[in-house]
Image: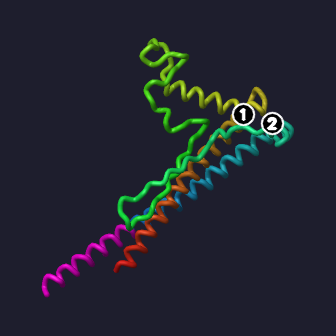
Amino acid sequence: MGTTAAAGTEGRGEAVGEEDGAILQLLDSLDGYISLMGSLSSSLRQGWLELSSARHSMGNSRISSVLFDMKPHSSATTVDLTVSTASDADQATQPHFSLLKWGSRGDEKSPSVEVDGKTPSQASSSTIYPAVAADNQVRKKRSKALSMFGALVPPKLRVAQGSFETSLEAIIEIANTRSTILSALGRLQTVDLRS
């Protein structure tokens, strides 16, 4: 009878440990979620302020919806969703969101990226490396996005663009944090049902 009581106490201790871990993960995720929401609010506020300041300095006719290209075109930024399956049958699957900006893809990390038609092994020491070339390409795409507002784009408009990009990154972090919150809540409910 003593071994049965010891096994019951041990099982109960594991359940309490799992429950404590799930509660800690939930509280940490909620804290991160609240701080990310504040960060998102701040970056959006900054972006709108910079945009209105640029519009004020350039005039309403230079920054307006009339200048927007309304033709269909591919998106400069996309969201990639991957769903990780949990190894434990008690845990639910958890989605993970990734932001792919300016046409970047996750599989571009191969070492055989060509620069000016040459692979890195064929390139001379003066050739731009792939990481720098990718950064230059992103910079060109950013400038092209703002070129509809004229050749001399005010710095405030560039800052507004950066603020809205930061906001997109914060939204993706918020989505991932929310996914973690829901996963921790599911774990907590599973532990509660077992005890």
* Res 62 quadrant in image: top right
Find disc 1 in the rendering and name its residue. 146
Identity of the residue drawn at 59% across and 39% down: 101
Q: Nearer the viewer, residue 159 or 117?
A: 117
- In the image, is residue 1 above or below residue 91? below
Tell whether 5 sits left or right of 14: left
* Res 3 quadrant in image: bottom left
How many badges with numbers are in the image? 2
Q: Position of residue 110 (x, y in %)?
A: 45, 30
Instruction: Estimate the spatial distance between the alpha carbons at disc 2 and disc 1, rounded to whole Å.
Output: 14 Å
Dot 2: element: helix
Q: Nearer the viewer, residue 151 or 23?
A: 23
Find disc 2 in the rendering and name its residue. 58
State which tag comes first along the sequence, 2 or 1: 2
Which region of the structure is painted magenta?
Answer: 1-23
Instruction: Say which quadrant the C terminus sits in.
Output: bottom left
Q: How would you classify the magenta stretch by its main secondary structure?
A: helix
Q: Position of residue 104 (x, y in %)?
A: 56, 36
